[in-house]
Amino acid sequence: MFDEITKELLAQKAFAALSTVMPSGHLSTQMMWVDADDSYILINTEVERQKFKNIRHDPRVAVMIFDPSNPFRYAEIRGRVVGTVTGTEAREHIDKVSQKYTGGPYANPIGSERVILQIEPERVRSQG
């Protein structure tokens, strides 16, 4: 599903820009930690965050993953959120992703329920 550059970027501590469509039609972009399984790009957020509200209104997203050592090496994934996972699995997942990015469990306060966004790629393009 993912090409070699995308797989390499997903395996490292590369940040992603997640773009969602707001109810007004404007775009909203946030820098995020990113993960993946064999089928989906995985983004972990909270149900009270604007990005989650946006995808409930319009599931289309774009994810741009940048190589931390060379920002001109990147992968762009366009797709849609086709599923969400909450509960214990989402809470454990944020600790796993935090381990990758910080070397420890997730330390920020959690204001609402964690949720994993399962993004099905419709187009993957990489460079580098």
Image (spheres, grey):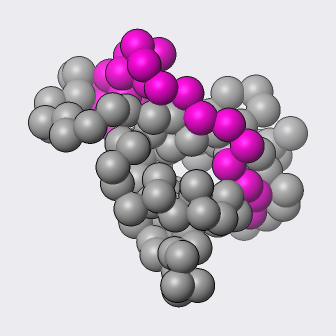
Image quadrant in which you'd find residue 8: top right
Report the quarter where the C terminus lies. Answer: bottom right
Residue 89 location, x and y as percent?
47, 16
Q: Report if residue 88 lies within the magenta region.
A: yes
Q: What residue is rendered at 45% in x and 72% in y?
A: 29
Looking at the image, which is closer to me, 54 or 10?
Answer: 54
Residue 57 location, x and y as percent?
60, 63
The image shows residue 125, relative to residue 112, as above or below, that is below
**What is the tally of numbered marks visible in this picture?**
0
Report the quarter where the N terminus lies. Answer: top right
Asked if residue 66 lies left or right of residue 118, the reply is: left
Q: Report if residue 82 lies within the magenta region.
A: yes
The image shows residue 127, relative to residue 34, as above or below, that is below
Which residues, given as a range, are shown in magenta? 74-101
Q: Can residue 69 be seen in this view?
A: no
Image quadrant in which you'd find residue 49: bottom left
Image quadrant in which you'd find residue 101: top left
Looking at the image, which is closer to me, 29 or 115?
Answer: 115
Q: What residue is rendered at 67% in x and 27% in y?
A: 37
Q: What residue is rendered at 73% in x and 43% in y?
A: 82
Residue 30 location, x and y as percent?
40, 65
Residue 78 location, x and y as percent?
74, 63
Q: Is residue 59 visible?
A: yes
Looking at the image, which is closer to me, 1 or 84?
Answer: 84
Q: What residue is rendered at 57% in x and 41% in y?
A: 117
Asked if residue 95 lies left or right of residue 105, the reply is: right
